[in-house]
Image (tube, grey):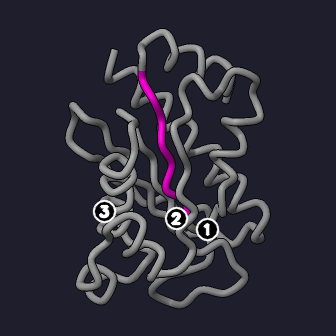
Amino acid sequence: MNVAALLDRAKAQGVMIATAESCTGGMVTAALTDIPGSSAVVDRGFVTYTNEAKQQMLGVRAGTLAAHGAVSKEVAHEMANGALENSNAQLAVSITGIAGPGGSEFKPEGRVCFGLASDSQQTLTETVEFGALGRDNVRRAARDHALALLSQGLLSLA
């Protein structure tokens, strides 16, 4: 993923970006802001590692967390929408997952849920099963997937 090209495209389109990250702990925002000039398009990043933070900072509903758990498309959806609503961005990506080690039969290590919200399109969600690649590899794979989603989101806004 060419992050500089993503930022250039966002700047050309006049699109600001926000992130809502859980298992990646800010890695997507870091990847974006590693590029000089990123302040022209990166509005903010929310690192919401706990359920309380997801609720307080992004407006994720307690009922959604109770019904589906933090690692779910439903929570990823609310995280992405919350990032959009609590920022000056027109495009937001969210990530919530189990980087490992651990997991369960129902939510295995390497399961990551993503959301992509924009001010002009319906919010998209997806779950990717990266597998038990190890914590660092799952987090890097999730970061890269989120950056690819942002790139796709910019294409749909063009």
Find residue 25 and report its image quarter: bottom right
Q: Position of residue 138 (x, y in %)?
A: 69, 62
Three-letter amino acid code of the residue under disc 3 = Glu
Q: Position of residue 15 (x, y in %)?
A: 42, 23
Find residue 67 and report its image quarter: bottom left
State the residue in front, 141 or 63: 63
Q: Position of residue 150 (x, y in %)?
A: 48, 35
Q: Residues within 10 Å of mark 2 (few under 14, many from 20)?
A: many
Q: Residues within 10 Å of mark 3 (few under 14, many from 20)?
A: many
Horizontally, residue 149 falls left or right of residue 116, namely right
Nearer-N-terminus badge (3/2): 3
Nearer-N-terminus badge (2/1): 1
Look at discs 3 and 2 and give the one toward the viewer.
Answer: 3
CA distance for labels 3 and 2: 15 Å
Residues tagged 2 and 1 counted as in contact (Cβ below 8 A) = yes
Q: Residue at x 55, y 80 (%)?
A: 108
Q: Which residue is mark 3?
A: 78
